[in-house]
Amino acid sequence: MFIRPLTEPEQHRLRGTGEPGRTIVAVDDDEIAGAVAIVSRELTVPGAIVPVAWVVRAEVSPTHRGRGLLAEMMTRQLTELYESGETVSAAASGRCARFGYGPASRALRLRTSGVSTPDSATSRIRLLEASSPELERVYDAVRRTSVGWISRPPRFWAALPASWVAAVLDSPEDGYALYRPGDAGELQVAEVGAATAQGAATLWRFLLNTGCGTSAQVPVDSPLLGTSRPRPVDTLWVRLVDVERALAVRRYTVPLDVVLSVCDSFCPWNTGRYHLATDGTRVTCSRTSAPAELCVSAADLGAAYLGGPTLTALAGSSRVIELRPGALSRTSAAFRGEHEPFHPSGMDSCSSGRTGARRCAVPACGSS
């Protein structure tokens, strides 16, 4: 929008993928100077699937930067989310980091050389168009058990370019791979989703046995890491809009009873002390006046929310402060997930709502 105008095919592909009522636009003399937009999705978190306000746009025109526009729009957006009872927001871009979004999922970007070896297991694979309704069903089954994955509406799949190809296992609930030919014959793998480790292994063998090199993002605990030199990349930022409700909705790996002191300069309603308790099944979180045992920012809670980055590691950077001996290790262990969270971010750019925005004017001025 602000880097270059959309081409006509891009406008056609993206039309209808946004939610105009969830877009805030900054206007200066009848010209759009900036916009923030979210869409309604679901996010899989440890032990639960929660509604999430998914950020698809947060930007200001180069001609209007340095005026505090983005902060003003983000403040309005997060305030409206809180007042409407929403709990969690998330983004696939680090642009939101300064507004209390913590990096909750990391992937490793790797390149592999092509190999061609016989593999009878790959005979289970069928190739489909990326817009196939079957792929939509497979994705929905996989994302419900995969921490860090979000829901996608039917219009997302309909908007995918025809160049993408889906490799789907014979048993539809097992998994799929989404890819397209890239430069110099290399396969650009957007995502691989599978319900089982065996299904994922079969899909990766298929991709690696094409004789082409592959470029992909994989979880940090992927067994593929011995095949190349990976490069780490953050793929998902999580923002706790309502700390009390957000901490109560997910599940924890071990019993916990702790009082957290939370600071949140961007969403001041979150600042305070919370008693978080779980017996391994039931979870409660409520405001308290009891002495705090652990001091943490809302952004760091967002980073740890999916069970990836540990509070212990964050404390090593002086970002989490232990006020009672043992509180840090207990809380960090409870937040930790069974597996590293992974957000398949390869197709996120296809879901951005670029057209049809409601015009909700914010004056193109303000404090930074």
Image: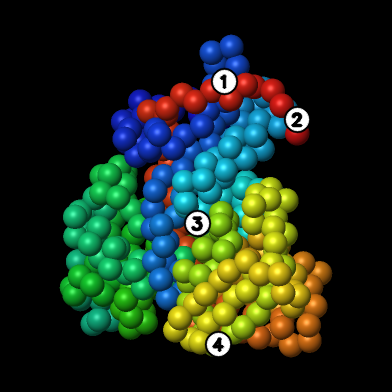
SS at badge 4: loop
Residue 289: give x, y in percent of width and height. 71, 69
Q: Residue at x 30, y 50 (%)?
A: 153
Where 15 sits versus 275, above or below?
Answer: above
Colour mode of the rendering: rainbow
Q: Which residue is mark 1?
A: 27
Q: Which residue is mark 3?
A: 87
- Give the amino acid type for the residue marked by disc 3 in the picture: Thr
Side (left or right) of 209 relative to 250: left
Q: CA distance from mark 2 to mark 4?
A: 45 Å
Q: Residue at x 49, y 77 (%)?
A: 283
Asked if the residues shown at circle 1 and circle 2 are in contact, with their CB atoms under 8 angstroms apart, the answer is no
Q: Residue at x 23, y 72 (%)?
A: 173
Q: Residue at x 38, y 28 (%)?
A: 356
Q: Residue furthest front?
A: 289
- Give the amino acid type for the residue marked by disc 1 in the picture: Val
Side (left or right) of 13 relative to 148: left
Name the one closer to the observer, 57 or 168: 57
Mark 3 or 2, nearer chain start = 3
Where 310 sits versus 268, above or below?
Answer: below
Q: CA distance from mark 3 to mark 2?
A: 27 Å
Comparing labels 3 and 2, the label whose residue is closer to the camera: 3
Q: Which residue is mark 2?
A: 367
Residue 67: give x, y in percent of width and height. 72, 28
- Give the amino acid type for the residue marked by disc 4 in the picture: Pro
Q: Which residue is mark 4?
A: 255
Mark 1 or 3, nearer chain start = 1
Residue 112 in sight here:
no
Mark 1 or 2, nearer chain start = 1
Mark 2 or 4, nearer chain start = 4
Name the one closer to the observer, 254 or 153: 254
